Image (cartoon, helix red, strand yellow):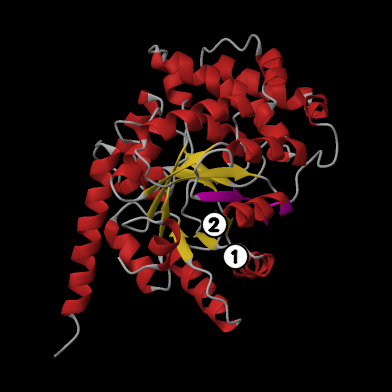
Amino acid sequence: MQSPICAMLGIEFPLLAFSHCRDVVVAVSKAGGMGVFGAASLPPERLEEELAWIDEQIGGRPYGVDLIVPNSFVGKGEAPSSNSAKVSDTHLNFAADLLEKHGVDSTGLSEAMEGRQSFGDNMHAEGAAKLLEVAFRHPIALIANALGVPPPLMLELGKRHNVPVAALVGTRDHALTQVRAGVDILVVAGGEAGGHCGEVATMVLVPEVAAAVEAVGATTPILAAGGIVTGRQMAAAMAMGAHGAWTGSVWLTTSEAETNPVVKEKMLAATSRDTVRSKSRTGKPSRQLRSPWTDAWEAEGAPKPLPMPLQSLVSEPALRKVDKLSEGGHEGAKALATYWVGQGVGLMNEAMGAGQVVQEFKQDWIAACERLNGFIGE
């Protein structure tokens, strides 16, 4: 395909798959797209293990790594280990009470919180630098950053190693800031997206950013993101000015994904209305599958979510316990179980392999383009 994304990344089809599962990354890259491994929560030694495995399995195909190094968060400039001391008993008790109401033993949440420092540590310059050092020891073809302009070290290493740097944006102004900073690819994520997202819909945001980039004379390629789980949606985004698609949610229900089986079943049964955009998981707005857990944090009288990364120290230990118990058949935990997913979940109705998903995207994309061409009179 004659997309600048394909030329820049050395791939056949401009479909990028963000996933925390290395098997998905490999399968998508082998199918002609590009897998991007989500590494934000991993300590450096784990990242080394995961990337070494990918290198062995991917057969020389291109793949990328995604980090979260936000421009602003609580504790920036301080020792990362100080975060746990800032978490209030009010929030911990609220999480514990919520678990107990659903028959889940809340014992050990405080201790688990103390051990949940990797995510917060990796946001700091020192922690991010360690992950970047690991990533650039491997033959990655892309490095991506979420929640702000990539740190100078990421941009520097990208240029030094000739690896394109991508950045996720949720507004026109953020996109122009990234262009001025020198990023190589804009991932333009609409509010339908799973995980961290803004408020502007993909249908509006993609053409808005495309026009703004063109107006300043830039040629930075755009990947559309947010609710895209089919080839026809990808074609529509490209018709609006994108050069390809960045996807995440659609891979959560694939056979390779390590998603909690209980959550997989919920996603396959969900409609587009069964997600909620909330700060209750990380402290920044992120879209996730609705459950009694998300409802409780949004209810009147619930404590206001703590800023990033403190809220994660409350939510993640509790939700990990929920996941473990739900897989064992605990009914209360099964009800509470949730995960990040976009509004496109309503179109995710069939479990299949990641490679098959790529092929479905290609066929659906071609059919959509042929349909549009059919509207052009001779």
Residue placed at 37% from the left, 45% from the top?
61
- Does the image show residue 308? no
Percent from the top left, x then y, of residue 209? 54, 72
SS state under label 2: loop
Residue placed at 70% from the left, 13% from the top?
111
* Residue 22 disc label: none
Check disc 2 and report the residue beneath it.
164
**Residue 151 counted in the magenta span:** yes
- Kindly give the residue lying farthest to the bottom in the view shown: 378
Q: Which quarter of the figure has residue 319?
A: top right
SS state under label 1: loop
Neighbourhood count class around disc 1 (C-alpha, 10 Å): few under 14, some 14–19, many 20 upward: many
Percent from the top left, x then y, of residue 331? 41, 16
Position of the C terminus, as image quadrant, is bottom left
Depth check: give the residue in front, 115 or 161. 161
Q: Please, what is the three-letter code of the amino acid marked with disc 2?
A: Pro
Position of the N terminus, as image quadrant, is bottom left
Depth check: give the residue in front, 132 or 138. 138
Look at the image and give the residue range highlighted in magenta.
142-152
Q: How many marks?
A: 2
Q: Please, what is the three-letter code of the amino acid marked with disc 1?
A: Thr
Check disc 1 and report the residue beneath it.
171
Horizontally, is 287 left or right of 106 in the view?
left
Q: Nearer the viewer, mark 1 or mark 2?
A: 2
Residue placed at 69% from the left, 39% from the top?
128
Of marks 1 and 2, which one's residue comes earlier in the chain? 2
Horizontally, is 175 left or right of 255 in the view?
right
